[in-house]
Image: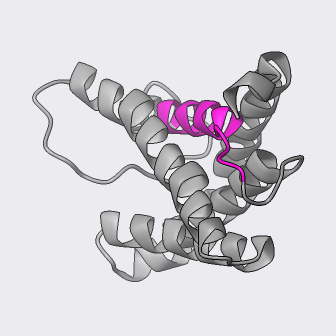
């Protein structure tokens, strides 16, 4: 719960997650893009991809879904499997449900889902609602990196 959050630890974990996925992106192209969406401006793209999407996705996939599954009596291991698979499938469909999405983004999203789930539930009671602060920070960092890369401001890993 929110009163039990160690903000320093969560921020450090979030920065670590974001850095890890930037390295994976730059070195292996594991998470290589952002869905093609119509935006009026680059500012809108940044606000949605770097801010709103990480918050909403992490709250849905790392907080609400696991909490609902725990209420239904789903054990944490199976809860994690459902969580990671649903996060991957969501990103697979967001990227167009094609072979490219399956081969890179689907795998990258699954790996990110695994890491985000583990850091959210590494030291928690199975049935408690968790605030996925580290996952939100990590997600925002990698989405911001990808957005900057799309704008051509970063050439590493292209």
Give 66 or 107, whichever is nearer the viewer: 66
Q: Is residue 104 above or below residue 102?
A: above
Q: Judge whether residue 139 is colored magenta.
A: yes
Given the current orientation, which residue lies at the most extreme right position? 123
Name the side, left or right, on which 153 lies relative to 5: left
Seen at 20% across and 48% down, the residue is 37
Q: Give x and y (percent) for residue 65.
A: 53, 61
Q: Is residue 16 above or below residue 106?
A: above
Seen at 79% across and 52% down, the residue is 121
Predominant SS of the magenta segment: helix
> What span is in magenta?
128-145
Name the side, left or right, on which 2 lies relative to 16: left
Give 134 or 32, whichever is nearer the viewer: 134
Q: Judge whether residue 133 is colored magenta.
A: yes
Residue 51 shows in this picture: yes
Q: Give x and y (percent) for residue 158.
A: 53, 46
């Amino acid at each position: 719960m929110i009163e039990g959050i160690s903000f320093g630890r969560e921020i450090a974990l979030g920065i670590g997650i974001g850095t890890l996925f930037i390295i994976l992106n730059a070195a292996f192209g594991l998470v290589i893009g952002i869905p093609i969406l119509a935006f009026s401006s680059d500012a809108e793209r940044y606000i949605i991809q770097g801010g709103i999407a990480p918050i909403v996705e992490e709250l849905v996939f790392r907080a609400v879904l696991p909490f609902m599954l725990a209420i239904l009596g789903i054990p944490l291991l199976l809860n994690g499997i459902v969580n990671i698979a649903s996060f991957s499938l969501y990103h697979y469909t967001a990227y167009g449900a094609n072979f490219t999405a399956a081969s890179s983004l689907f795998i990258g999203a699954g790996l990110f889902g695994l890491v985000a789930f583990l850091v959210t539930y590494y030291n928690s009671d199975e049935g408690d609602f968790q605030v996925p602060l580290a996952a939100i920070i990590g997600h925002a960092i990698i989405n911001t990196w990808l957005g900057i890369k799309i704008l051509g401001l970063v050439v590493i890993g292209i």
